Image (cartoon, grey):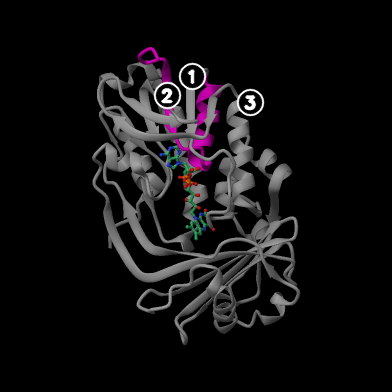
């Protein structure tokens, strides 16, 4: 493959990578998105985009496609003090948007392709070479290939291989909690309200949100010092019992049946201080993850993509390898991925 055939290669077709790919292709850039999954499956990820993220998604032209394909408006949030009407009480005057994550990924990646990005599925990146002409090594259908671009953006998620290959150091501020999630079908609860209950007496929290089409995502937050991690099919009953122990939600479970994997993730903040070097930029969870309870993931991806997209375009992307990324872009990426110190 010829050198610098692309303006931009994006590793990972999650919300971050696909949204950036769509925006940059719309700006006329020659974009390649490499996504290792041929078909997305439930990895237990965020499925509620807060109103400030919805506002960004609307500006990006992503809200309507997501909502039409797999989204549902969540107007009310109840944290144990009665329902809060998000339309009436947020500066954006918008509801939250909930979705089934794999369908959202399919939708946003399809939008990137429709905007002119070249999207390769089943293409797994196995190495990255930083430098003035950065390149990726990839494997697809048993073949090895490489491709280079003026800029490579790693949007390959919380376990980012690209981050490691390119030599970025990860900072960590762990918290003594784990966050578990499970998809259920046909719960007996409203379709336009999400619930989040903290119960300090038993050191548990539970959150439940509708994700459309009769599906609901349930989360349980619990202390990580417990020996029994909520993970795998054998712990589904215990997960539901812990959810009920956290809050008076037992009636919500009438008629419900599990419909996906149960997985737990560490809470806390994990980030890269300076998410750009030698032609490689990190975005999304690859650049930083924060406590899932803050709901920053989906929202900050949209925000970050927009600010990066604007800066890249203003600079004419072809000039990027000649100098470091502008401080304003770095600052936005840092503020989107990292909590203030303290
Ligand atoms: C339990 C949990 C609950 C959460 N709840 C919320 C919430 O309520 N609201 C919210 O806003 N956020 C929430 N989040 C955060 C949110 O899910 C993430 O911030 C967001 O999904 C990250 O998107 P991303 O595109 O950066 O990464 P990902 O969605 O992880 O996408 C990365 C993509 O890269 C691909 N990939 C990886 N490696 C390679 C490779 N080598 N080659 C090619 N492709 C590769 C993967 O297949 C994947 O498609 C939650 C997260 C968790 C874990």
How far across and how far down the image is residue 120, in percent?
A: 52, 29
Nearer to the camera, 92 or 79: 79
* Farthest-out residue, front: 142
The answer to whether mark 2 and mark 1 are in CB contact below 8 A is: yes
How far across and how far down the image is residue 95, in percent?
A: 66, 54
- Against 203, residue 148 (above or below) is above
Spatial CA distance of label 2 from label 3 is 17 Å
> Residue beneath label 3, please?
114
Residue at figure coordinates x 53%, y 40% from the top left = 37
Mark 1 and ligand 1: say if the CB distance to the nearest ligand atom is below 8 Å.
no
- Against 320, residue 80 (above or below) is below
Give left or right: position of 286 versus 118.
left
Circle 1 or circle 3, nearest the eye = 3
Mark 2 and mark 1 lie on one chain; the one further toward the N terminus is: 2
Check if residue 54 falls in the magenta segment: no
Spatial CA distance of label 2 from label 1 is 7 Å
> Could you classify mark 3 by the number of other residues whose Cα lies within 10 Å: few (under 14), some (14-19), or many (20 or more)?
some
> Residue beneath label 1, please?
29
- If the image is split into quadrants, where does the N terminus sit? top left
Check if residue 2 falls in the magenta segment: yes
Residue at figure coordinates x 54%, y 55% from the top left = 46
> Residue beneath label 2, please?
8
- Against 200, residue 138 (above or below) is above
Mark 1 and mark 3 lie on one chain; the one further toward the N terminus is: 1
Say which element carries label 2: strand
Give left or right: position of 273 versus 176.
left
Mark 2 and ligand 1: say if the CB distance to the nearest ligand atom is below 8 Å.
no
Nearer to the camera, 99 or 23: 99
The answer to whether mark 1 and mark 3 are in CB contact below 8 A is: no
Give left or right: position of 277 versus 252.
left
Q: Which residues are magenta?
A: 1-27
């Amino acid at each position: 493959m010829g050198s610098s055939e692309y303006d931009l290669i994006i590793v990972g077709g999650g919300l971050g990578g696909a949204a950036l790919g769509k925006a940059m292709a719309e700006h006329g850039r020659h974009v390649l998105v490499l996504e290792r999954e041929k078909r997305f499956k439930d990895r237990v990820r965020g499925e509620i985009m807060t109103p400030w993220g919805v506002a960004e998604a609307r500006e990006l032209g992503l809200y309507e496609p997501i909502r039409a394909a797999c989204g549902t408006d969540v107007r009310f949030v109840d944290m144990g003090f009665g329902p809060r009407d998000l339309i009436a009480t947020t500066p954006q005057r918008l509801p939250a948007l909930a979705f089934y994550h794999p369908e959202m990924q399919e939708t946003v990646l399809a939008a990137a392709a429709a905007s002119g990005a070249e999207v390769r599925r089943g293409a797994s990146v196995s190495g990255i070479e930083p430098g003035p002409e950065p390149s990726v090594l990839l494997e697809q259908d048993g073949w090895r290939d490489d491709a280079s671009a003026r800029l490579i953006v790693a949007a390959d998620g919380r376990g980012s291989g690209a981050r490691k290959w390119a030599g970025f150091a990860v900072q960590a501020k762990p918290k003594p909690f784990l966050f578990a999630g499970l998809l259920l079908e046909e719960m007996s609860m409203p379709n336009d309200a999400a619930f989040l209950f903290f119960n300090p007496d038993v050191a548990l929290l539970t959150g439940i949100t509708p994700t459309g089409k009769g599906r609901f995502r349930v989360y349980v937050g619990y202390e990580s010092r417990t020996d029994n991690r909520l993970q795998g099919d054998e712990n589904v009953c215990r997960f539901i019992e812990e959810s009920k122990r956290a809050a008076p939600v037992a009636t919500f479970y009438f008629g419900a049946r599990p419909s996906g994997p149960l997985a737990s993730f560490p809470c806390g903040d994990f980030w890269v201080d300076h998410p750009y070097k030698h032609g490689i930029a990190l975005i999304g969870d690859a650049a930083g993850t924060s406590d899932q309870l803050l709901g920053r993931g989906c929202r900050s991806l949209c925000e970050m993509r927009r600010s990066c997209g604007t800066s890249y375009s203003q600079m004419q992307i072809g000039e990027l390898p000649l100098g470091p990324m502008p401080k304003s872009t770095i600052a936005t990426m840092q503020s989107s991925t990292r909590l203030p110190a303290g």
